Structures are given as C-alpha cells and as structure tokens.
Amino acid sequence: MRSIDPDLLKEYTLRIWHYKQGEVVSLMVHLGDRLGLYRAMAGGREMTSGELAERTGLSERWLREWLLGQAAAGLVERTPEDRFSLGAEGEEVLVNDDSLAFSAGAFIGGFQPERIEEMVDAFHTGIGVTYHQLGEPVALQMDRMNGVWVGPFLVEQVLPGVDGLVERLEAGGRVAEVGSGGGITVRALAERFPASTVVGYEPSGIAYSRARRRIRDLPNAAIHQARGEDLADGSRYDLVLALDCMHDVPFPDRIAAAVRRSLKDDGVWLIKDVHCSDVFEDNLKNPMLAMQYGYSLSACLLSAASEEGAAALGTLGFHPVEAERIVTEAGFTSFRKFRLKDDPTHNYYEVRP
C-alpha cells in the first residue's frame, strides 16, 4: 500500500470540497438571478428575509436559507440582526446587465433541469418534495457519499463511544434505524452483530428497494417501507439510530416521540447530525458553510419542507440547542453530545430515557 501523508490528504480533500462548494453556490447564484432576488435587493437597502418575501412574493423560509447561504459565500452582506444587503459591486456583477462586469448570466444551474424546477417551485409555494421524489440518482449519490461513514466507521469508531453498547449488541439486542436509506447501516450492523436483529425504516420506495436487495441474504436483518413515526410501540428496541436524517424529515418531533415509545427503558437513541451552531457567526468558522446552505436548498430543506406545517429544519437546523429541545419534549431525560476526531462535520448525540 502506498504511504499517505495525512497533512497532504487533508489539504487535497479540502481542495476537492471547495470545488464542490463552487458547484453548489453556482446553483444558488442561478436561482438568485432567475427568481429576481438580486434585482429585488438592488439599491443597497438592508432588508430582512421577510421584507424580501414581501417584495418578491416568495416563501420567507426559503429566502432566509438562500440569504444565509449568500452571506456565507460572501456575496451579500449581513448584519448581526439578520438584515441583508447587496453591495454596489455585487449589484454591478449580479444585476446590471449593461455592465462589462455583469456575470450572473453565466450561471445556468449545473443541476438536472427537473431538480432546478422543484427548487424554483418551492421558493414560490414554500413546499418542497420528498426524498423519494428526488429520484434514483440522489439515492445512489447518498449511498456512495456516505457508505463508509454509516458502515465501517459507525461500527469501528462510533458505537464504541457509547458505554456498553458494543457488548450489548454482541450479546444480542434489537436495533432499529429510522431513515435507513439504502440499508448500508442495517447490513453493517447485522453482519457485525449476528446475535442481534436489525430493522430499518425507510419511507422512500427507491431507497427501500435498494435496501431490500442489499440485505436479502441476512437472516437477522429486515427493512420496512415506513416513516420514523411508524416505529412499533412497546419498549422493543435496545438501540435506535437516526444517522444524518433528523434535519431532513418534516416532523422530527413526531419521530422523537415514536423513538421514546419504542425504546426500552435502558435503551439508547444514537443520533448523528451536522456539526453546526444556532449562531450564524459561529458557523462562519466552517469553510464549507456556503455549500451546506446550498445543499439545504437543493436537497435537505426540500425534503424537510415537503409537507404543510413541517418543521423545515434544513441542513443546519438540527443544531445542539434544537436537538436537545426536541428530545427533551419527547420525554427523554439524558442528552450527551460527543464529537469524533476523524469526523469533523458531525455531532453525535447519545440520548436515553
């Protein structure tokens, strides 16, 4: 095996993700141009997301996410009171199509046309689309992007961080995963802990089908096409997992209540979600912040706002303050956040009844 310099690896990885951030931010620029958002901000006046919504007739929640992403990218200015403005230079580049500096017209989205249309519709209606409706390419992308993190890394590094959990599963326990996607975690746990039974709950028919194929040879694994709210009652599970999905679901409070009803009194709910703060200035320390807001508008918020009355958390919405509030209101009394050195992008939460 070739030797790898860890510092050069970190540098190279960051370089690659900067290119990905550029891809996502370019989509946000396209939406800002197409929806007339930059033009509505012309003149230098500071405005809130609500005032921009009044001016454009678009959804305040979606405009708020877009504005924060634009501020993270350094394309609009933001005050601590969440008032936003477009500088004179930004207006020249993004609004004034008579200027030699005008550049907004060069951005055409970079995503599949039907995906862009879904985002445009969501700005108008405030309602997104489900993970299932995002289609097979997104399900495949999630499997490829997250596979090692929700498989080997989970088994080898995350589970040992919860006291007594590995030993409990080795002896034989009942495990459920909500938002189990393509079944990577279900398979990894069923293989590593053959004495335990592992069941996944996944509402997307596309992801459910992928999961069924992935686990079909494992007698101690199963998958249900069902939402997290549909977890069976009756104190059945020793462990429930929610990996990088609580910010994506329309009603995280309902899932928390269902987990509380279905978990044994000495069971554990293990949650993994995006490492972020409820304070925007703290999040600015993240060099990929603009990309995360772009991901939100192109995927996470689309799913999280896919129903009327949804919480619509989005990529950075399940921060520690919100996470603790949701689990406490569901009846949990123990909440511990922990981080892992090799995973700088996520928080882990050990939640107990």
Image: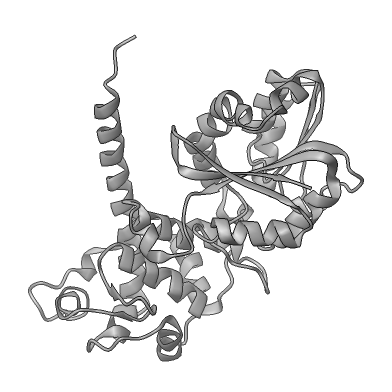
Query: Residue 255 occupies which quadrant of the picture?
Result: bottom right
Query: Residue 249 occupies which quadrant of the picture?
Result: bottom right
Residue 310 seen in render: yes
The correct choice, above or below, for 118 with respect to 189 in the image is below
Q: Which residue extends farthest top? A: 1
Residue 96, position as x, y percentages in the image: 17, 81
Residue 111, position as x, y percentages in the image: 39, 55
Q: Which residue extends farthest left? A: 100
Taking the spot 87% from the left edge, 46% from the top edge, the residue there is 232
Residue 161, position as x, y percentages in the image: 60, 31
The correct choice, above or below, for 157 with respect to 37 in the image is above
Left or right side of 208 for 118: left
Left or right side of 48 for 41: left
Q: Quadrant of the N terminus?
A: top left
Taking the spot 46% from the left edge, 54% from the top edge, the residue there is 276
Taking the spot 37% from the left edge, 56% from the top edge, the residue there is 289
| Front position in the image: 185 or 110 | 185
The correct choice, above or below, for 58 with respect to 152 in the image is below
Left or right side of 91 for 322: right
